[in-house]
Amino acid sequence: MAISAFGEEPPTDEDDGPGVRGWRRHDPPDPAPEPPAGAELVGRRRKKMLWVDKHRPKTLDKVIVHEQVAQNLKKFVAEQDCPHLLFYGPPGSGKKTLIMALIKQMFGAGVEKVKMENKTWKIDTGTRTFDLELAMLSSSHHVEMNPSDAGFQDRYVVQEVIKEMAKSRPIDAKGKRAFKVLVLNEVDKLSREAQHSLRRTMEKYSASCRLILCCNSSSKVTEAVRSRCLNVRVNAPTEDQIVQVLEFIGKKENLQLPFGFAARIAAQSNRNLRRAILFFETCKVQQYPFSANQVAPPLDWEQYVSEIATEILSEQSPKRLYSVRQKFYELLVNCIPPESILKKLLTELMKKLDSDLKHEVCHWAAHYEHKMRLGSKAIFHLEAFVAKFMSIYKEFLCAAFG
């Protein structure tokens, strides 16, 4: 990246006579501007970072939310060892923050020197051989990846990564931690075969590798995997805790917050700290100084799902079902998780349903969420849920109004 300096007057030379300023025919060209020092580069990068990353606690001592969990994790740092860990809790509760703070406190600043690469493994199943490529973050002390991105080949990823890490036993500067850490995200989305493979592999290579698993729901992780890990429940932060974090960020960014502004964002975030911080930064970009009644704009995809719910309730027909399917395709193409679409759609439908229907509709939403997880084509299950809902709702309307 080229860095240019502007705004300085060129040097003048009074001996060159009129009309010639700062330039001689035989003078060597001006030297290139010196690159910024390391501290200046870091400062520039921090300015470009999102607040959710810029103000993320780097160590367990700086954690504002979940202080008790952080205190318990410090014991592993003192003992120079830790078991396999399973962090679980709702999205935006702070699981990744705690995980990275723990790893940094165990291994030091070297954990931040990460590189991203697309790793390719040659998989031999006995009947066929194929290449499997997956993105991963790695440092000299840990590897972070999402094996569920491999789809039905996720079990091979789990086996190959841990085997590769187990080949060499890293030793830190003090020679005390002879193991590497593997962070696996979204473990609850792994297939059953991958989870069984994970159980066997984590037993075999426990001497040279520690696993830190991260997921939203522990109920979707097999009992065999859960029993081999220390389970760490990370609850969703309260609205008061979110307000505390937003005020802390506001102070760091030298912002003036109107009374009740942080509380409104906290209420709008649905106890999702990541979302609250993103809302906060969006409000800053949208309008600053903040107004007394300013709120964060709704997410586009959530507003789109709300419109879908309104269409479903207004008409139940094959034509409307086809229209809804096209809109589901648009959401999926824009990388909105199908589970989030289904959950948001259910929330919007429940707002306008009679209490007699709510239990049955929730039952079918859970049914198709489970089917969606087992299958590979989310659009089929989203459409099936809408078709089932239309059938139930139309039958209810006919019985109620004739």
Image (cartoon, rainbow, N blue to C red):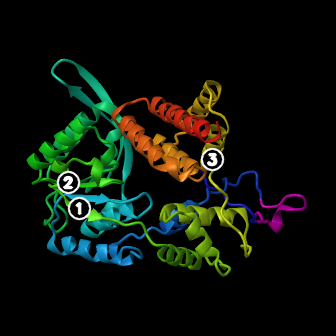
Residue 110 lies in the magenta-colored region = no
Tell me whether the residue at label 2 lies in contact with that at label 3, contact meaning CB atoms closer than 8 angstroms. Answer: no
Please rate how many residues cluster around mark 1, counting C-alpha atoms within 10 Å: few if below 14, some from 14 to 19, many from 20: some
Residue at figure coordinates x 78%, y 65% from the top left = 9
- The location of residue 120, given as percent across then percent down, is 31, 33
Tell me where the magenta segment starts and ends, as one range: 9-22
Asked if residue 241 is positioned above or below residue 154 in the image, the reply reads below
Please rate how many residues cluster around mark 3, counting C-alpha atoms within 10 Å: few if below 14, some from 14 to 19, many from 20: some
Q: Main secondary structure of the magenta part?
A: loop
Q: Amino acid at mark 1?
A: Asn
Disc number lying in front (2 or 3): 3
Q: Is residue 348 visible?
A: yes
Q: Secondary structure at mark 2?
A: helix
Residue 20 lies in the magenta-colored region = yes
| Quarter assignment of residue 326 | top right
Q: Is residue 164 left or right of residue 307?
A: left
Residue at figure coordinates x 79%, y 66% from the top left = 12
Q: Separation of disc 1 and disc 2 at Cα? A: 7 Å
Q: Nearer the viewer, residue 193 or 33?
A: 193
Q: Nearer the viewer, residue 57 or 265?
A: 265
- The location of residue 206, given as percent across then percent down, is 11, 53
- Label located before the other in sequence (2 or 3): 2
Q: Amino acid at mark 3?
A: Ser
- The location of residue 257, given as percent across then percent down, is 65, 78
Q: Nearer the viewer, residue 295 or 307?
A: 307
Find residue 226 and name its label.
2
- Label located before the other in sequence (1 or 3): 1
Find residue 306 and name its label.
3
Please rate how many residues cluster around mark 2, counting C-alpha atoms within 10 Å: few if below 14, some from 14 to 19, many from 20: some
Find residue 231 and name its label.
1
Q: Amino acid at mark 2?
A: Arg
